[in-house]
C-alpha cells in the first residue's frame, strides 16, 4: 500500500457511511460518536505539537461530549451490576450479610 492511501480509504469509508445514512440505514448514532472522538484526537494532536493547554482543553471537552453521548451505556452497566450484586447477595450462605 502506498503512502497516503490510509487517508483515501478513510475518506471512502466516511463517504460510504454518509450515503448509507441518506438511504435510511440509520447510522446517525455513529456520526454522533464521531464528532467527540475527532475532538479528542484533535486535542491529542494539538497536545503533541506543543500547545498542551489548548490540547488538554479540546480533549477534555471532547471527552465530556463523548461521555454524554455514551451515558446510556453507563446506565445499562449500572443496571446489570445491580442485578449481579443482588443475585450474588441471595446466593451467599452467610446470614450476617442478609437483611
Image: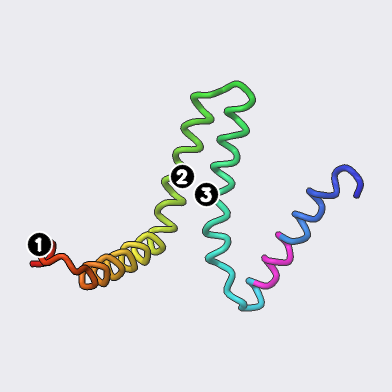
Q: Disc 2 versus disc 1: distance between alpha carbons? A: 43 Å
Q: Earlier in the sequence, mark 2 or mark 1?
A: 2
SS label for mark 2: helix
Q: Residue at 50% x, 36% y: name it.
A: 58
- In this picture, which residue range is highlighted in magenta? 14-20
**Residue lying farthest right?**
2
Q: Is residue 28 left or right of residue 95?
A: right
On the image, the x and y values in percent for residue 66 come to: 46, 51
Residue 44, above or below 51: below
Residue at x-position 27% and y-position 68%: 88
Disc 3 to disc 1, how far (Cα)? 47 Å
Magenta highlight on residue 17:
yes
Q: Are marks 3 and 2 in contact (CB under 8 Å)?
A: yes
Cα–Cα span, label 3 and label 2: 7 Å
**Residue 72 percent across, percent down from the top left:** 39, 64
Verify CB contact (< 8 Å) between mark 2 and mark 1: no
Disc 3 crowd rating (10 Å Cα; few below 14, some 14-19, many 20+) is many
Q: Nearer the viewer, mark 3 or mark 1?
A: 1
User: Total marks drawn?
Assistant: 3
Q: Residues within 10 Å of mark 2 (few under 14, many from 20)?
A: some
Badge 3 is on which residue? Answer: 36
Q: Which residue is mark 1?
A: 96
The circle drawn on residue 63 is: 2
- Check the picture and name the quadrant holding the C terminus: bottom left
Q: Residue at x 53, y 65 (%)?
A: 29
Q: Earlier in the sequence, mark 3 or mark 2?
A: 3
Amino acid at each position: 500500500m502506498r503512502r497516503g492511501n490510509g487517508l483515501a480509504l478513510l475518506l471512502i469509508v466516511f463517504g460510504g457511511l454518509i450515503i448509507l445514512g441518506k438511504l435510511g440505514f440509520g447510522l446517525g448514532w455513529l456520526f454522533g460518536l464521531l464528532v467527540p472522538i475527532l475532538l479528542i484526537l484533535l486535542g491529542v494532536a494539538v497536545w503533541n505539537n506543543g500547545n498542551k493547554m489548548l490540547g488538554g482543553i479540546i480533549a477534555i471537552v471532547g471527552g465530556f461530549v463523548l461521555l454524554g453521548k455514551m451515558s446510556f451505556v453507563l446506565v445499562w452497566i449500572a443496571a446489570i451490576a445491580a442485578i449481579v450484586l443482588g443475585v450474588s447477595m441471595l446466593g451467599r450462605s452467610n446470614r450476617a450479610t442478609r437483611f
